[in-house]
Image: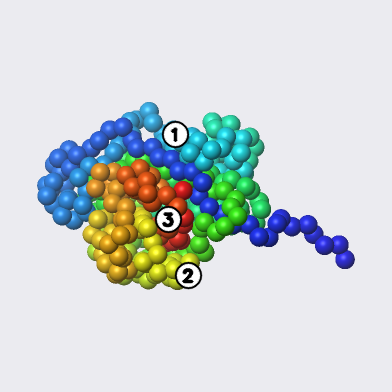
Amino acid sequence: MVTLKTPQPQRFARISGLGGYRSERTVTNEEIVGPINSSDEWIQQRTGIKTRHYASEDVSVVDMAEQAAIEAIANAGLKPADIGAIVVSTVTFTVATPSAAAELTRRLGTGPVPAWDISAACAGYCYGIAQADAFVRAGTADNVLVIGAEKLSDIIDPTDRSISFILGDGAGAVVVSASDTPGISESVWGSKGENWDTIRMTSSFLDMKKDPSTPWPTLRQDGPSVFRWAVWDMAEVAQEALDRAGITAADLGAFVPHQANMRIIDELAKQLKLPEHVKIGRDIADNGNTSSASIPLATERLLRENPELSGKLALQIGFGAGLVFGAQVIVLP
């Protein structure tokens, strides 16, 4: 019997480079409180958000992803030709097909590498890391580019008090590369489909086709239900990620949760009993909730402000519409 040749089995993966793109326009709470009959104080008390960023009309999801990717590749000490696959997580790319990732192969000059988009909302970046880790360890690629990019300002309703006022635009990217030592733990990921519509669009494009008077689809959420799920269920997921990595909270240098709500972030940290030395990503105060881009952007900020974290362990967890979730422990680049 002929035995198939397989890649070297003892391979690991790590994040080798990180990049981010923060949209140019800063939007304060004062600019958005009128249509929702609210106040800066109300928004800060409920979410911890002071500002968020909106991209200009001529800036697309791919434009933002490209800038974050260029920075991540450079910070990894690589060239675009070294990238073996591209994964883009986004729910705001304006066409169903072709993918944003395929367009990036042309813009970045990577050559004809495999490229695809994933729709996993705010857990999409962690989903991308799980996929990239598997591909690198299997020997399918030496370097995988993972990007979370969102232009959420395209799908908000200025009068909506459930979610629109927390959302912003941006992109974050990392390169996952082959490593002699483990740099990404086993991922904990899944979905809770029975709560599929807890975070949802107001209508579908098919609805608009059937009735042209249908308003442009925008996001809505059942805030209290999402809050309870994010706090209680995600604390268990985060703990499971620590357990699978074979570490405790005391071994962490950083905790980088999805930037959904400052109260959720603080409650998760409390339930995980994080020691005081663990730095916590709180990029949401200035950047808002950027869905799949929020974890890499928060990580980029943590490392920029705390360079001593390089090489330390970070627990990251994403959760959002679906309801989907994903978490893993990484070695910070």
Q: Residue at x 39, y 61 (%)?
A: 252
Secondary structure under the numbered disc 3 in the rendered image: loop
Q: Amino acid at mark 2?
A: Gly
Marks 3 and 2: which is nearer the front?
3
Q: Is residue 225 visible?
A: no
Q: Residue at x 31, y 65 (%)?
A: 274
Task: Indicate which disc, 2 or 1, sits on the residue closer to the N terminus.
Answer: 1
On screen, residue 81 versus residue 232, left or right, reads: right
Q: Viewer-proximal residue, 196 or 325?
A: 325
Q: Quadrant of residue 191?
A: bottom left
Quick one: which residue is furthest to the front in this view?
Answer: 308
Q: Amino acid at mark 3?
A: Lys
Distance (Cα) linking label 1 and label 3:
26 Å
Q: Position of residue 276 (x, y in %)?
A: 27, 62
Marker disc for residue 312: 3
Marker disc for residue 246: 2
Distance (Cα) linking label 2 and label 1:
35 Å
* CB contact under 8 Å: marks 1 and 3: no
Q: Amino acid at mark 1?
A: Gln
Residue identified by numbered label 1: 67
* CB contact under 8 Å: marks 3 and 2: no
Distance (Cα) linking label 3 and label 2:
15 Å
On screen, residue 275 versus residue 91, left or right, reads: left
